[in-house]
Amino acid sequence: MSLGIVMLVHTAFGRAEQVARHWAASGCPLVIHVDKSVPRKAHSAFVEALSDLPDLRFARRHRCEWGMWGLVAATQDASEIMLREFPGVRHVYLASGSCLPLRPVQELIDYLAARPTTDFIESATTADVPWTIGGLHEERFTLRFPFSWRKNRYLFDKYVNLQRAIGFRRRIPNGIVPHMGSQWWCLTRQTLSAVLQDPERAVYDRYFSKVWIPDESYFQTLARQYSRQIESRSLTLSKFDYQGKPHIFYEDHLQLLRRSDCFVARKIWPYANRLYEAFLTDQAGAMNRTEPNPGKIDRIFAKAVERRVRGRPGLLMQSRFPVEGRENRTTCAPYSVFEGFADLFENFEPWLARVTGMRVHGHLFAPGRAEFADGQTVMAGALSDSAALRDYNKRAFLTSLIWNTRGERQSFQIGPDDEIEHVEWDIAKDPNAQISVISGAWAVPLFQSNANFADLRSAAARLQHIEAEHLKVLRSQWARARVRIWTMAEFVESPMEPLQSILDEIGHSNPKGLAEVPRMADLSGFGQFLQNLKNQGMHPYLMGDFRAESGVHEPPGRRGRPYLVR
Amino acid sequence: MRLRRKRAKVRAFRKHFSLRPVSDRTVQIRPGDVLLFSTLRDEYVRLPYFLQYYRDLGIAHFLIVDNDSSDGGTEYLARQPDVSLWTTKASYKRSRFGVDWLNWLQSRHGHGHWTLVVDPDEFLVYPFCDTRPIRALTDWLDSSAVKSFGAMLLDMYPKGRLDAVPYRAGQDPMEIAAWFDPGNYMIAKNRLYGNLWIQGGPRARVFFADRPKKAPALNKTPLVRWDRRYAYDSSTHMLLPRGLNLTYDAWGGEKASGILLHAKFLDTFTAKAEEELRRGQHYSGSVEYKAYAAHVRENPELWCKWSEKYINWRQLEILGLMSKGNWA
């Protein structure tokens, strides 16, 4: 009986009894503390149920409230009984009623017997730990906390603010250095008795009774004073989430717990029958002397907290709907937006799809319908091409499309005729968007059309106005998309370099350069067309300078062979 | 808002006089039990699987209002040992689609319990529902100091015509209606109530593609740690007090949430749509049923090439329709 168990119980007495019997069956003496707020009836039934165990004592009951002194007082009393009544005990293990031994108790006894002077207590200085609840870090030790955080949050907060305002600071007695760590420890008789029999204990008790969450700092600090050898880790597998409440283990964690090789786990859901059955029946001594290895469980719980706190970027759903500015990206993956390219090049979309392997949509925000790639009427995620549905919530339309097609880069066209008014800023502010604009290219379809010139003139004026406003958005200081803007004249001058740089950024391009170039529209006479617009009093400026003489800006495609960029 | 809540309570009180108990077994309810509340009419064929599904999840007691069924469902329910049954002949519409009746029963019997309010064609799926009973979820919500749990309606439909495969009593409806729309949902925030207003899915895609505003709402908060002061307002889409509607995270994170698999579109649907249209007892002039009846006559196929076949909750969670939050 070199190992003694101090057990704190406040609920699920049936399970606590089961675990107590399990410990006792391996010859471990127990001291049990039952929370004072447990009704007398439940308490006496519990005591009655365990009355047949010889090496079991009950400690004086304290009211244990989370974050308050009661838990420490209870531990002190119970530990004193343990040290006094069971002189053979060398290590004292602090456990709770919802702790579950995962390995045969004998393995734990052997493990401790091999390390007779080691104290297992997680203990780190406050500066080095990330666990903080309520934004209190070092102040846990320098302010006074007489009010409960759970029950009297208002007074708790007010009192903290008051102390901060008047600059109150407590003196830490005897220059001890506050340490914190998991409240579940395993100490040697030497260390524990030194803490409990310290002549200064009254001073420490007075100090720690007004520290916040003393159960995570009292023994952790004082053990540092006396221990010969501290292993700063807890033998109890116990994980806390971002709110400071313990993660709970369920039946589906069985294999994980098995493989963790930890001695004790906390906290177990009381109705997880299979866990209790699996671990409390004596395993036929698979005496593996491995060290505990909770890495996988750590990762799972860390991921869960990450999911709760940061969520999946670019996903809008029933339980993730961030306010503006907290989206952590509007969309979940990079995508490309092309403006004017489909007007200037005759076969731009099929060409782009071939060269990059992206899914290339037409004008997704066209007035009539969402022009999905390959003329589909429904897109990934069962997204409808109905303009009414799309316009009802354009942002949802865009984020859904990008979310539904994770793993496949999307691109689409935008033109001044499209209805982007509610989604324009979302795209411009989205760091995932790669926006490439050939300004003024909307004039090409006008130039090629067979409409009356008066109509062309008014259409040109309208489109130019819309595009100018749109470019202001793209150039604004809030735009965080990767934006490239060329005037049409610039672009026509040397079309391959811009195309190449866009494709490079997309990352799909062939290292040898472009094997195939898109076919540019026939622009002979375009300069004259612009001149005619000017002559009619409309001033087309977004396309840059085209001279009126024909032949100056002949597209390269007309030379008879595509030219290659090496 | 307080007035609205009071009004809901007063309505619940007024409408409760029309409820007539058939079998009241509520004395069996123990503290900590998770209770299910439902209102139904002529759903006999669905009941055996419905009760089975929720018993398997760990629902301890069913409290059901039967709105004048004539198909034998009443007698069937009265025979069940864990069902308390009330009947009424009063108007479904004028009890605000059953909400008044259930508000009353919930304040009478649900106080201090976790209560689940679902229709007989709704099947709750929550994280880890294949390995953990519902009590594990509610205990965890309790320990996280969370009082309400959101679950979006997910419309399930068969491949092919809706009436192609007949549904047999006791059968898992998801064997027939196995498909759903994985990613075409639209969310807006209701500024008054703080809840999210979710629309989309096959009903919006097929029946309401030209007037999305009228598309039915899919957001629901079915699982609540009930207090007698609480009330559903006009439908289970909104709760009062408003804080209970905040089942989502507004700071970029994800709260835990579930899904209500909505097995409405079975072969029983066509007949139901016609009948409900005739009764005119549904929301905003039964506009929904008018749209259905019109479409269902010509082309009752909701399936499309991008529909997804239902596997389990993990699939829904990966698709981003529900979330584990920080439950692991």
Image (cartoon, rainbow, N blue to C red):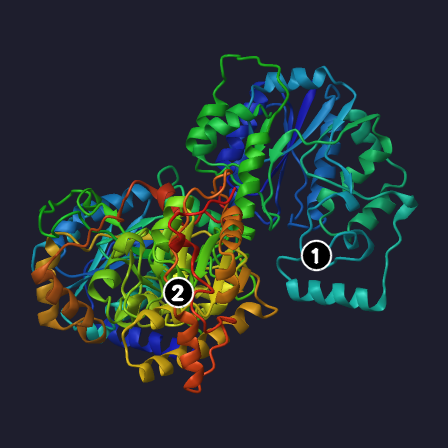
Picture layout, residue A309 above or below residue A515: below
Question: Seen from this angle, which residue lies furthest bottom?
Answer: A537
Residue A394 in which image quadrant: bottom left
Q: Amino acid at mark 1?
A: Gly
Q: Are tags 2 and 1 found on a single chain?
A: yes
Residue A385 in which image quadrant: bottom left
Which residue has dot 1 on it?
Answer: A135
The chain containing the residue under callout 2 comes to A
Label 2, secondary structure: give it: loop
Q: Nearer the viewer, residue B187 or A219?
A: B187
Q: Residue at x 84, y 45 (%)?
A: A204
Q: Residue at x 79, y 57 (%)?
A: A144
- State left or right for residue B162 relative to residue B153: left
Picture layout, residue B127 above or below residue A491: above
Q: Position of residue A320 (x, y in %)?
A: 47, 57
**In the image, which disc is placed on residue A523?**
2
Q: Residue at x 41, y 81 (%)?
A: A533
